[in-house]
Amino acid sequence: MRIRKRFAVLAVAAVLLAALLAWRLLPRTFSQVSGSDGRQPQAVSCIWDSLQLIDGEFVPDTAELQGLAPDDEAYTRVIELLSQTQYRPALRNLLPWPQTASPGMTECAAYLLLTWDAETADATYLMVMDDNLLAVQLPGSEGLLIYYPDDPAALRSLQGYLAGAAQSAVQ
């Protein structure tokens, strides 16, 4: 009888653990990932970095869009592109210590700051590395949450848009 009881307890624990992991790994919308709670950012700022190998030399390229307001076309397009796909959290988000991410030797990266409330400096920091990773730092948190897009083409489109929009803003 004791063995059956132990087996039942272990089976229930295994089912609960599997359910928790399944829930944790379900895809999230951009609204859920960014911690917006249904709010719309007051401002969006973006920096796009590219490192290309041309004729055997690394050539950096940087462009930025600062202080985009909700009535700006670029603001609407950036939020739209981020919302085009869903994001799956990385297993390392379950670790108890803060996570870090570094662009390293990626071909290009985009850094975005979504300002929810300028008076309280309530903002979410996003880092898009190539087209396969979104790192998010929510307001008041120390580490990053790592997400993988279901459709990497959406992040490629975002980086292409940022590069084009920032370059045309400079000219």
Image (cartoon, rainbow, N blue to C red):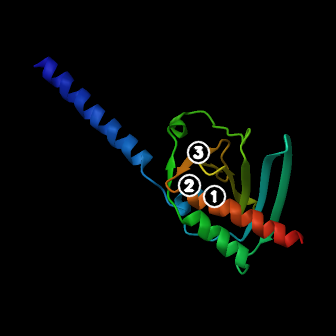
Marks 2 and 3: which is nearer the front? 2
Residue 4 occupies quadrant: top left
Question: CA gap, disc 2 to disc 1?
Answer: 6 Å
Mark 2 nearby-residue class (10 Å; few <14, some 14–19, many ≥20):
some
Question: What residue lies at 89% left-to-right and 72% top-to-bottom?
Answer: 171
Measured as percent of width and height from the top left, residue 45 is found at 77, 64
Q: Amino acid at mark 1?
A: Arg
Vertical relation: 45 (above or below) 17: below
Check disc 3 and report its element: helix, strand or loop: strand
**Residue 41 in view, yes or no:** yes
Which numbered circle lies on residue 156?
1
Question: CA gap, disc 1 to disc 3?
Answer: 17 Å
Check disc 1 and report its element: helix, strand or loop: helix
Q: Residue furthest front?
A: 55
Check disc 2 and report its element: helix, strand or loop: helix
**Residue 115 in view, yes or no:** no
The reply to whether dot 2 and dot 1 touch (C-beta < 8 Å) is yes
Q: Can you identify the residue that label 2 sits on?
A: 152
Which numbered circle lies on residue 77?
none
Question: CA gap, disc 2 to disc 3?
Answer: 14 Å
Question: What residue lies at 29% left-to-right and 32% top-to-bottom?
Answer: 13
Which image quadrant: the N terminus?
top left
Q: Amino acid at mark 2?
A: Pro
Question: What residue lies at 63% left-to-right and 37% top-to-bottom?
Answer: 99
Q: Can you identify the residue that label 3 sits on?
A: 146
